[in-house]
Image (cartoon, rainbow, N blue to C red):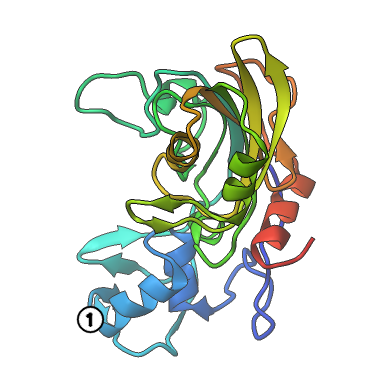
Amino acid sequence: MTTGATEPSDASEEEPGRAATPERLQKFLSRAGAASRRGAEGMILAGRVRVNGVVVTTLGEKVVAGRDEVAVDGTVVAPPSELWYLLLNKPAGVVTTLHDPQGRPTVARYVPKDAPRLFPVGRLDHATTGLLLLTNDGEFDHMMMHPSHHVPKIYHAEVDGIPDAEDIRRLREGVDLDDGRTAPAEAAVVERRHDGSVVEIILREGRKRQVRRMLSAVGHPVRTLSRIAYGTVTIGRLPEGSVRALRDGEVNALRRAAQGGT
């Protein structure tokens, strides 16, 4: 269930993964899932990071994976030796976390037993179904989730009624919610039914329960909601509750999308 998708290289460094190849400490911390690169810089400047037992507070420090011991707040961290990228078709009623104090079913039950510790890339609320990415690649996770990267996500929502042209215009231009106006979205009615309709919405931001709140704001409460695509990666015919490994090309396409490419 693994993929050998290549990690983007730093122009000033050799390809990561080769023995005895130094890399910047903040990049090491990001690959280890400790924080984004910017967050890692903050950790370093705050004196929270030790390399081989010595506190490092400068951003020019370089380390070698497998040779140097790096600790954050006293806990040793290291990038995974093998990177995993999975796609789960999340069922309704499943919580997007690895452990739930309330005992509700979590996405952890769908991870293959031979997998390392994986974490979800972003969230789907418990009632929403569809495409959820799981990985142990901290840098990939931060890249996908950074608000400036705007990787598009496509949702299909079954709603009450049929949105008219004015409703669609509002969704496309932005809707005023309690946490501010949404960014413009792509929206269209893709199916009309006798008691409702299916609306496709493409978002490039990720607020909590955003699709549900946007559609409620224009008078069409959501009955069911499913995410069918993330960037160029689609759910396809993957059965609900099933997982598959992302192909190398899919991982690299997501990276390009996050970096503003195609």
Relative to 34, 11 lies left or right: right
Count up the numbered dots.
1
Let me know if residue 21 appears in the view. Answer: yes
Question: Farthest residue in the top direction?
Answer: 194
Identify the residue at horizontal 79%, vertical 60% (top origin).
262
For label 1, the SS is loop
Above or below — where is 88 with respect to 262? above
Q: Find residue 130 and report its image quarter.
A: top right
| x then y, percent, for residue 83 | 58, 48
Nearer to the camera, 81 or 226: 226
Front-most of residues 5 and 257: 257
| Image height of 9 relative to 159, above or below | below
Q: Position of residue 228 (x, y in %)?
A: 65, 32
Q: Residues within 10 Å of mark 1 (few under 14, many from 20)?
A: some
Q: Nearer the viewer, residue 52 or 206?
A: 206
Residue located 35% across and 18% down the image: 105
The picture places residue 233, in percent across and down from the top left corner, at 72, 41
Residue at the spot of label 1: 47
Nearest the viewer among 196 and 232 is 196
Residue shown at 61% from the left, 33% from the top: 87
Measured as percent of width and height from the top left, residue 70 is found at 34, 69
Q: Is residue 66 visible?
A: no
- Residue type, label 1: Gly
Image quadrant for the N terminus? top right
